[in-house]
Image: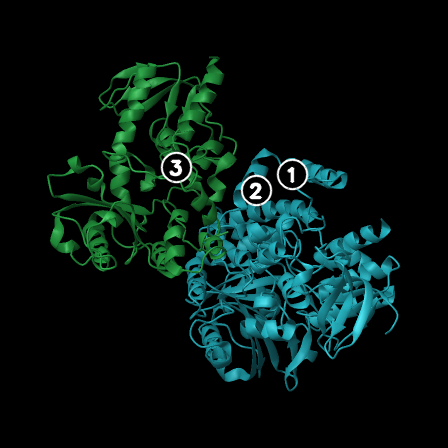
Chain colours: A cyan, B green
Amino acid sequence: MAAVRDVVIIGGGVNGLVTAFYLARAGRKPLVLESRPVVGGAAVTAEFYPGFRGPILAHAGGPLLPQIERDLQLEKHGLSVVEPEICVFAPSPDGCGLLLRRDAKETARGIAQFSARDAEKYVEFSALLARYGALLRQLLSLTPPVIAKPGSEDLWNLFRFGRNMRGLGKKDMMRLLRYGPMAVADFVAEFFETELLRAVIAARGVLGSAMGPWSAGSTAHLLLQAATDSHPARAPWFPRGGMGALSDAIAAAARAAGAEIRCDAAVEKIIAKDDVATGVVLKGGEEISAEAVVSSADPRRTFLELCDPSYLGPDFLVKIQHFRGKGTLAKVNLALDGLPQFTGLVRANGARAAQGSAGAGSENAPAALQGRIHIGPEIDYMERAFDASKYGAFSPHPWLDITIPSLADVSLALAGKHVMSIYAQYAPYKLKDGDWATRGDEFLKTVINTLAEYAPDVPQRVLGAQLITPVDMEKEWGMTGGHIFHGELSLDQLFTMRPLIGWARYRTPVRGLYLCGSGTHPGTGLNGASGANAAREILKDSAG
Amino acid sequence: MSAADFLDQWFETDVLKATMSASGIIGTFLGVRSPGTAYVLLHHYMGEIDGAFRAWGFSRGGTGAISNAIAAAAREAGAEIRTQAGVERILVQNGRAIGVVLEGGEEIRAEVVSSSIDPRMTFEKMIGERELPGDFMEEVRRYKYRGSSGKVNLALDGLPEFAAIPGTGRHLRGAISVSPAVDYMERAYDQAKYGEFSRRPYIDMVIPTLTDPSLAPPGKHVLSCFVQYAPYNLKEGTWDDKRDEFGDTVVDTIAEYAPNIRSLIIGRQVLTPLDIERSVGLSEGNIFQGELSLEQLFFLRPMAGWARYRTPIRRLYLSGSATHPGGGIMGAPGRLAALEILKDIGK
């Protein structure tokens, strides 16, 4: 058997790679084991139809936390980011549309065509979200404190956070406490009267989640997302070349710092002796011994699949079995023979402004379509989409969140052709009637037909299509339940309770085994925070 | 966490989970799968009867008998109680409550005014926004009521027979819950979300005449049905037009379980949330004076910064279900408010 490795990291997704970087930078010798042929996990770019490459799973992520971005120096490692001026285009079924821009005041001018009151409120809302985002951002890079017996560092961090919270002023602070547990539908209704605007903003509170806009606590989800990007509807942050380019750059940074990365190396078992992790066994039988094992896989996979139950004890196992995470999001990638024509774009608010700068008619389309396209015109539409999933059916009219990455990077498709990347929600992990293997095509058709209501030429432009259901995400990417955040971001599974109360500090009941994936705090997407926090805790243990 | 998720951790039998989940939604505008309903479920286990924690009970003579007993205790302690004395207005002078005016014009001066009605009725109806800070009124208007339940009282010629357990035995003496499946409960909620009453509602029934026969003529019975969901705001039509249709829906639903019910009905009273608002003065017919959702509980009930029974008006207090810990017939808000009032007046 080969020499004992220092640290092995299970999974080469964004969090696993970020952990590897920080460990390597501190002089450790991490070995990353990725089961797929490429690094990146959910953030990968690949060919899905001859001549068409795209962000296979995640199509928007980040931004990385500023500190992580500075530490990794990703531009140096080949990352180039596109940040389109128009963030969201949201068509409505009556042929109108809403454009949300990066700048709040400019956006407000467009919203004024729908409602003068909303235009005014939008500026106020943007500012409020920016204040809350800045405050909550501090939480993202904290290790959740031990509530029963906080240490001095915990107390200091909580004190600092409390002080900053008071800095919001009494009114904002009280409002924040009230907003958190609210349904996001109520939250947006406190500000806006335009249904389309409400729906666009509320959408972020339910992304990837088994919640609808009327579910309590969806506002907390939205506010946590605002901690990495406080634009009311997210400001797109697209790596040129798709999300895979982000992963490649992080991997390059980790390698440069001294990490080793192996692809096609699927871990089958974690081994422990006397409650201490001693290494892993790969599929095929290869055994790798290590001083420490770090898993970026989700908690249920880590503890229920990779660990022997005898390591953990029945109480812990029962709690992990109850960790909730049934995916609701499916991914559709389309190869299109040209740019689709959205009817709502002609009459979209601010379209005149876009025409002014980029010419009339279809000439202005690329600029307006470079951000995300939101299809889900009303809160009730979104909620009805969710209703179906509660009973094990996919939405007959799903909410779609779309990007066209080939607009920013023409090399992704053949000349003149385009790649369309779609998050389609809700597509529950478990269907009541039939299964995804037999009903996938039906859902794909549903997505394309829904899209056609807003861009009628889409069906005839489709050259090829790829559907990735939550079941595929579980099979191919190892995400239990096909949940993109590795587990619901609900109030009872956040911060000191992620994944479990008492086990939110990246350590596990097995000494030398750590978690660093989205199933740990904050776990809110491709921002690297979980990975960086875990690395800090691992280094603390080895220093002590 | 939702009531359904919470119960999933304990049980696998659908009808058991559904019946228990009902405690998570009573009086709320939430479904059994809505996050936060696990709390409401536990909220209903807060009370105790004769030292038995989380016990529920019936009082002989109906819940009115509880009120009468409490009133007797209050009188004995020295309180005076006047009925048919509807308060129309609270008198405020220089930011301080100085008394009330009754319907009919009688004026009663007082050192302290304590209001056990909800914030909307207290501040919007009985005081008016001129006396109150704008920020505060904004919060008062934001406070959510969203009554979601109705009440149907049936006068019966005899006891109903349920297909599941024939006969008229002991099983009729407790609560009878129409809640056959978790999905049934959730679908009932779905319709309410879009402004309709449930076509197949959750019904919680009791037959109080089995505990206290004096409530009806000999051999006759009373069937008291708590029905959810009946949203205060209907998308189409008004409750005045839909009252009978709602009553029919309830009877039809019961008939699916107790087929002889229709032939037994001698009389029927249907109380919609609108009727509850009109007759009892509960805004939007919410039986808890405001939704028991997380953002309206504890230090946020009824609103942030005003959860300590005091109000922006000096010597005016809130002591109803709209204050911590909220609804249910348990008396806690009234007691806690009294303690605060005593602190302030130095007794």
**Residue A120 vs residue A486, the one in the foreground:** A486
Answer with the quarter of the image where residue A241 lies.
bottom right
User: Few, some or many C-alpha atoms within 10 Å of disc 3 (few <14, some 14-19, many ≥20)?
Assistant: many
Amino acid bearing label 2: Leu
Q: Which residue is mark 1?
A: A165
* Protein chain holding label 2: A
**Residue A501 location in percent, x, y?**
63, 49
> Quarter holding the N terminus of chain A?
bottom right
Residue B10 in sight here: yes
In three-dimensional space, the C-alpha distance between marks 3 and 1, rounded to whole angstroms, equals 31 Å
**Residue A254 location in percent, x, y?**
82, 65
Residue at 41 percent across and 48 percent down: it is: B24
A357 is higher (above) or lower (below) than B30: below
In three-dimensional space, the C-alpha distance between marks 3 and 2, rounded to whole angstroms, equals 24 Å
**Residue B72 location in percent, x, y?**
28, 21
Amino acid bearing label 3: Gly
Residue at 27 percent across and 43 percent down: it is: B274
Q: Which residue is mark 3?
A: B327
Lateral position of residue A143 relative to residue B57, left or right: right
* Protein chain holding label 3: B
> Could you say whether the residue bearing mark 1 is in a helix, strand or loop?
helix
> Could you say whether the residue bearing mark 3 is in a helix, strand or loop?
loop
Mark 1 and mark 2 residues within 8 Å of each other at the beta carbon: yes
